[in-house]
Amino acid sequence: MNIITHHINNKKIAEILTDEVVLRTTEDGLDLLGNLSYQGFDKIIIHSRNIIPDFFDLKTKIAGDILQKFAQYEMPLAIVGDFSVYNSKSLNDFIYESNKRKKINFVSSQPEALKVLAE
């Protein structure tokens, strides 16, 4: 796993770059959160390809469990991907509500992720 560091507005943003799935469980989320926080990162960007597909099926509760940890530990997160491939009203509503709060953001590109995390 590679971590690209972005510095914006005195914030250190980690962008995860890998071909592997790194978020499968709540424990994976806590490990990622803890490791990046320990390294001094303030915010995180992860790509949807690095998250287990079941995350996007809200019935599994994986998304809620993982994202609750990021919110609880006040670590803003941007998830980059094409979410239009999911035909789920509940997921679309979840994404809409998450993006309104600005702590967990679902965006379509890395530049958009940097923009929302810079605010």
Image (spheres, rainbow, N blue to C red):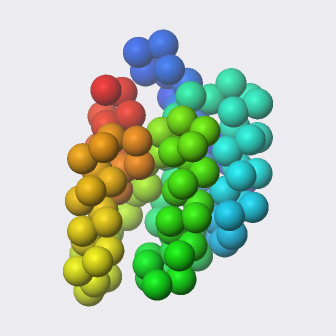
User: In the rendered view, would you say 100 is above or below 62?
Assistant: above
Q: How many marks?
A: 0
Q: Splitting the image into 4 quarters, where does residue 91 fall?
A: bottom left
Quarter holding the N terminus? bottom right
With 36 as the anchor, is 53 left or right in this view? left
* Residue at image location 26% in from the left, 86% down from the top: 87
* Residue at image location 24% in from the left, 47% down from the top: 100
- Can the viewer see residue 95 in this picture? yes
Residue in the foreground of this view, choosing between 95 and 80: 95
With 50 as the anchor, is 118 left or right in this view? left
* Residue at image location 74% in from the left, 41% down from the top: 34
Q: Splitting the image into 4 quarters, where does residue 14 fall?
A: top right
Residue 53 in picture, x, y percent from top left: 52, 80
User: In the rendered view, would you say 79 is above or below 114?
Assistant: below
Residue in the foreground of this view, choosing between 86 and 72: 72
Furthest-top residue in view? 10
With 82 as the anchor, is 44 left or right in this view? right
Quarter holding the C terminus? top left
Residue in the foreground of this view, choosing between 1 and 41: 41
Residue 60 in picture, x, y percent from top left: 53, 83
* Residue at image location 76% in from the left, 30% down from the top: 38
Residue 76 in picture, x, y percent from top left: 48, 39
- Can the viewer see residue 20 in this picture? no
User: In the rendered view, would you say 103 is above or below 40?
Assistant: below
Residue 33 in picture, x, y percent from top left: 67, 44
